[in-house]
Amino acid sequence: MADRKTADLVLTGGTVLTLDRGNTEATAVAVADDRIVAVGTDAEVTALAGPDTRVVDLYGRTVLPGINDSHLHGAWLGVLWPGTVMGSGGLGGGEAAPALSTPGERRAAIRRTGDLVAALGITSYTEPGLGPGEDAGATGCFSSGVLDEYIAMANEGELRARVTVLRLFGELDGPSTLADFEAGLATGLPSTDPRWLNVAGVKIFADGIPPMRSAWTHRCYHDGSSGHLLVDGGDPAEREANLRRMIDLAHRAGAQIGVHATGDRSIEVTVSAMADAIAAHGKAGRHYLIHGDLVAVDVLKRLPELGIGLNTQPGIAVMTAPWLAGALGDEALAGAWPLRQALDLGVGVCLSSDAPVIEPDWRRWIAAAAEWLNEEGVNPDLMLKLLHCYTVTPAVQDGAESWKGTVEVGKVADLCVLEANPLTVAPAELPQVGVQMTVVGGRVVFEG
């Protein structure tokens, strides 16, 4: 239950949702240095307090593992906030976003996001796409320079959240070439502490999105088109071959692969290519589909055995459902974002925000997930599943489940304290439950 090391921080008198395999509950937790050293009763945990220990009475509040937003564009969020690409149901005002052109501007954007996520109980996030493919990008928010600033901040101890990065060797939401991808993959990785900054793999844009008629689909859009792969090639067959080659190259290099794929056809090809790479070279990395709007159930059934995850955004699903129906029809919408089937099949589902497309408040998007599932009222079992999708499963996506993602002795002290127990409220009420404290690596980075 406890390590006898004197604690630096003790949280007592509340509810601790460990989210471990048994979803164990406790009333107190103790931290020494950057680790959890005790989880248990108030008496067991306060026994580790010494004269210099900070003891916090929770007064019934609830401790969770730190929240992990596994798809969040940190530098872009820092530039746009409090603006987002999508406001309350519609696109933003159309103003040009300020461009990041200097190291100071990049660092300021990352710091601003660090402050924002700390106030939301977020202790980890994934920057899904930074690299040379965007060095000439209009915003500068996804460039190699942003990655350089993350590296410098990590090495200087300035990050307020743990960051995972996928490198990008094509354009954001745009084309990529096999030659650029192969050259980028051959470049060296930075020297950092991977527990603070982990350049884990690569991001590939397979296609676009259904509302823009750029997702590659079996159905035709109302104009008769069906989208296409964004990977460069002279015809559809060459595009597909190049995508498959990219996936094979990255897999053999041991890189994690995150593929933006929204159309059912692009998802089928992506999963087939990953399966072929795994069969040929063995399992490597924690590959996953990003968004997966139109993923078919027969494809979902393959994912658990292959170890392929699904990273999806219920907030975007709720907001854009009418647009998808307008592009592909009500029948396509009826099968879109099959969250319930994915959870029932044991797919490794991560819920995320894609901020600043929408805001990074995970409480809203858990509520949106329940709305998508047509679930109302207090439902502790459902809430636990959705909380796992923002904590435990993202740690698996990060390849870090051995040291973060749950409140257990020996794991890093990444904690989120809520003013009420989320298992006792309806999902629609969760956004009104305040974040009271955020702890990252044993350090308090936010107090409400």
Image: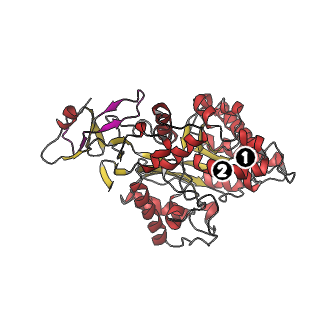
Work out how far the residue at label 1 is from the one at label 2, CA to CA, in angstroms. 8 Å
| Image position of 43 (left or right of 403) | left
**Image quadrant in which the C terminus is located:** bottom left
| Image position of 16 (left or right of 110) | left
Residue farthest to the left, as pictured? 51
Q: Residue at x 62, y 72 (%)?
A: 95
Q: Are marks 1 and 2 in contact (CB under 8 Å)?
A: yes
* Label 1 packing within 10 angstroms: few (<14), some (14-19), many (20+): many
Q: Residue at x 31, y 34 (%)?
A: 409
Q: Position of residue 334 (x, y in %)?
A: 72, 39
Q: Amino acid at mark 1?
A: Leu
Q: Determine which of the numbered discs, if any, sits on residue 243 in the image.
A: 1
Residue 8 is covered by the magenta coloring: yes
Residue wearing tag 2: 204
In the figure, residue 338 lies in which quadrant?
A: top right
- State the residue in front, 303 or 330: 330
Q: Is residue 209 visible?
A: no
The chief SS type of the magenta part is loop
* Label 2 packing within 10 angstroms: few (<14), some (14-19), many (20+): many
Span colored in magenta? 4-26
Q: Amino acid at mark 2?
A: Ile
